[in-house]
Image (spheres, rainbow, N blue to C red):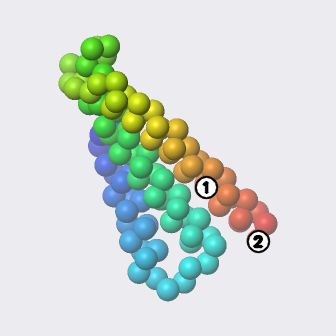
Amino acid sequence: LVFSGLLSVVGSSLILNLFFKTKCKDPCRRLLAIMSFWDIIYSIQIMLQPYLAPAETSQLVWAVGNDRTCSALGFFNQASFAAFWYSGFLSLYYVLT
């Protein structure tokens, strides 16, 4: 999960970098940039999830988290669903144009 999350962060970062370098800011590119931002958040959450799980309740050896880190992971997990919504908006944009 860590390697695939890292690849996702790199790919989405490249998309965001390309978005900010170009002058064309049509709705399609804006939707793609916002979707890439939320994908970065989701990928970081996926990479950190095994390590920030509560050490008292997790059976993972490398879990060093506590209840607060578990709550933060839950928040970012729920917030990252925005990437899926923006993917749907981008699909809808292509259907309507």
Label 2 neighbourhood size at 10 Å, few (<14), some (14-19), many (20+)? few
Drawn side of residue 38 relative to residue 90, left or right: left
Say whether marks 2 and 1 touch (CB < 8 Å). no
Q: Secondary structure at mark 1?
A: helix
Residue under label 1, please give it: 86
Give coordinates of residue 77: x percent, y percent.
47, 38
Give coordinates of residue 23: x percent, y percent.
50, 86
What is the distance, in whole Å, between disc 2 and disc 1 at their CAs? Answer: 16 Å
The residue under the point 76% across, 63% down is 95
Drawn side of residue 30 relative to residue 20, left or right: right
Drawn side of residue 94 relative to residue 81, left or right: right
Residue under label 2, please give it: 97
For this orientation, the residue located farthest to the right is 96
Give coordinates of residue 68: x percent, y percent.
34, 30
Quadrant of the snapshot with the N terminus = top left
For this orientation, the residue located farthest to the bottom is 23
Q: Amino acid at mark 1?
A: Tyr
| Mark 2 or mark 1, earlier in chain | 1
Drawn side of residue 5 relative to residue 22, left or right: left
The residue lying toward the viewer, choosing from 66 and 97, is 66
Asked whether the viewer can see residue 60, the reply is no
66 shown above or below 27: above
Quadrant of the snapshot with the C terminus = bottom right
The residue under the point 45% across, 41% down is 76
Label 1 neighbourhood size at 10 Å, few (<14), some (14-19), many (20+)? some
Q: Secondary structure at mark 2?
A: loop
Q: Residue 91 sits in which quadrant? A: bottom right
